[in-house]
Amino acid sequence: MSESAVDESAQREAFDRHVVPEIEVLYRVARSITRNPTDAEDLVQDTMLRAYRGILRFDGRHPRAWLLTIMRNAQINRVRRKRPELLRDPDTAMARLADEDSADLGPEAQIVDAEYDAAVERAVDALPEKFRAVVELVDIQGLSYAEAAEIMGVPTGTIMSRLHRARTRIRKHLESSGAYVNGRPT
């Protein structure tokens, strides 16, 4: 057997072992991200293709997390392709989109919104990984507790507990930075 045939055989075997069992989870997550069955199928197919190409470099640990990272990156690239101005000058494009969203706000409100958004981002970034992952899955990507639990491989109650603790930490971080006072953004 030639070396390329051995590599191809190992590639198929690793793909069958690590990727194929996760297809249902990938599809559910893709549906929650895209909100469209056709786009979800395309995203899963793109994820699987990328996984197949890179499976020989994968260490075999945490295949679901590895696949979801591939999916997230594939989705980011898909969005960028749909909005090519993000590729040319992402800072200007994002600023323009933010201006369109806040066009009805006065200058003071726009500054407060931008500062508050930055404070929230810093608070989320300051979380330990297990809390940040739950916030990203539930609060940012909009997954249900059950979906997040399945992705992270923990019970639903653990997701709920981590989310509560993460939100408490975010609120405390915002309060200590002065961005949040008496339960309201400043």
Image (spheres, rainbow, N blue to C red):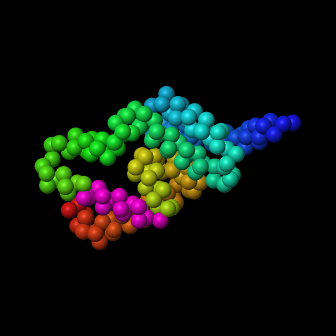
Query: Which is more toward the observer, 36 or 114?
Result: 114
Residue 155 vertical placement versus 45 (above, below): below
Residue 104 vertical placement versus 179 (above, below): above
**Residue sitting at x 72%, y 43%:** 14
Q: Is residue 148 left or right of residue 126?
A: right
Q: Residue furthest bottom?
A: 176
**Residue sitting at x 24%, y 54%:** 114
Tally the marks.
0
Q: Residue furthest top?
A: 38
**For residue 171, what is the image quadrant?**
bottom left
For the N terminus, give its image quadrant: top right
**Residue sitting at x 23%, y 54%:** 113
Place of residue 17 in the rendered image (x, y in percent of width and height, measured from the top left): 72, 44
Q: Residue furthest right?
A: 1
Q: Is residue 9 visible?
A: no
Q: Which residues are magenta?
A: 115-128
Q: Is residue 120 magenta?
A: yes
Place of residue 144 in the rendered image (x, y in percent of width and height, measured from the top left): 46, 47
For the C terminus, give its image quadrant: bottom left
**For residue 132, what is the image quadrant?**
bottom left
Q: Is residue 142 visible?
A: yes
Q: Is residue 153 magenta?
A: no
Q: Is residue 125 left or right of residue 55?
A: left
Place of residue 151 in the rendered image (x, y in percent of width and height, measured from the top left): 56, 49
Place of residue 180 in the rendered image (x, y in percent of width and height, measured from the top left): 25, 64
**Residue sitting at x 17%, y 42%:** 103
Most frequent secondary structure within the magenta stretch:
helix
